[in-house]
Amino acid sequence: MSRGHLAAIRAWLVVVAVLVIAMVVVGGATRLTESGLSITEWKPIKGTIPPLSADEWAAEFEKYKQIPQYVKLNLGMSLEEFKFIYWWEWSHRLLGRLIGIVFAVPFLIFWLRGWLTPRLTVKLVGLLALGGSQGLLGWWMVKSGLADRTEVSEYRLAMHLTLACLILTAIVWVASSLKEERFSGAVPGTARAIAYLLVPLVLVQIFMGGLVAGLRAGMAYNTWPLMDGHFIPALNNLYIMAPTWVNHFENALTVQFQHRMVAYLIVALALLQAWLAMRGGNGPARGRALLVAAVALAQAAIGIITLVLVVPLWAGILHQLGGVLLLTAATVHAQRLAAGSAPQLAARA
């Protein structure tokens, strides 16, 4: 594989990664505006075209009127109000379709031209499969709110968000592995271990954020640094539900508390890694470690602002964006450290 081919493939993956980031951000806005149940059918092809006439809009609105969310929460909603939430969900689904096309078509072209090594082909097929499963998981999530609930299941929402971020991690890792670098990204052993740990830890934090969003846990306990009057809430409130494990997924107090605690842990580890890298790493490694720490601090600050302001739309969207940017920065840093000092030649991709 020539350097030109390598650069083209990497640029394509970067474009796909940017689209996935946009997808996650729009998905967050869809949740914050309570728009996710506005489209009650899954039509992967036909659903690309939105309603184009008054009759088509009336038909879509009528379908929405049949689900519990309308009956229990939005009874009397106007058609214009329905259009507002419909466009958010339609845009989210359209982005998903666009990502599928932007990934599949160039992949097929690169493969037919013989630009891909067998190893890279396997990785890209895996990414394609993950993307397809994300579409199915998204519809499974929506279905949870169409019959007996007024919102989607927080479990399925968190899974949907986490899978999207896992796909982003995989895309960024593969794209970064195609970059040639002639010098080591070495840092002290502890800093290297922290860099590897941060990627799964941020993914866990994103899953917890999905639970917070699913339970609307950010709408309560809107003080910082204290929560319910304490830095650590009373145990009988944290574990008021039975069985005990349910509190970690369904108790809004517990879910928000653990989201806060993991955020503190991520910031502390990111700062420690940056300090260690400054003491013993080379230029590029130090720069990446400092970037991860800076993004982690910014994301924590945005999270606090979002909480204290009781989750306004702009802050919620910014917080979602910050999460995926932190994940991206941590993934690139970890991959470059894993690559070591050897150039990332195409034959190894």
Image (cartoon, grey):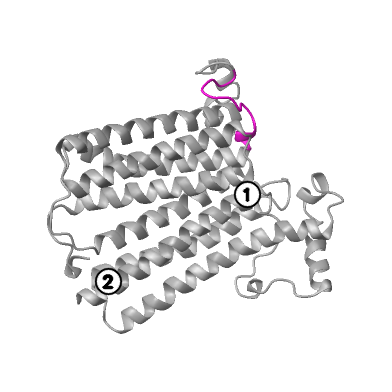
* The quadrant where residue 73 appears: top right
User: 252 and 26: which one is in front?
Assistant: 26
In the picture of the structure, the residue carrying the numbered disc 2 is 7
What is the crowding at mark 2: few (fewer than 14 residues within 10 Å), some, or many (at least 20)? some
Looking at the picture, which amino acid does disc 1 mark?
Arg
Q: Residue 67 location, x and y as percent?
A: 77, 53
**In magenta segment, residue 23:** no
User: Which type of secondary structure does the marked residue at label 2 adopt?
Assistant: helix
Q: Residue 235 location, x and y as percent?
A: 53, 16
What is the crowding at mark 1: few (fewer than 14 residues within 10 Å), some, or many (at least 20)? many
Looking at the picture, which amino acid does disc 2 mark?
Ala
Residue contact between numbered discs 2 and 1, judged by CB atoms under 8 Å: no
Q: Is residue 319 above or below residue 60?
A: above
Q: Is residue 346 above or below residue 145?
A: below
| Magenta span main SS | loop
159 lies left or right of 9? right
What segment is highlighted magenta in the picture?
216-228
Distance from the alpha carbon under mark 2 to that under mark 1: 36 Å
In the picture of the structure, the residue carrying the numbered disc 1 is 31
The answer to which of marks 2 and 1 sits earlier in the sequence is 2
Residue at 78% x, 56% y: name it.
Answer: 81
19 lies left or right of 126? right
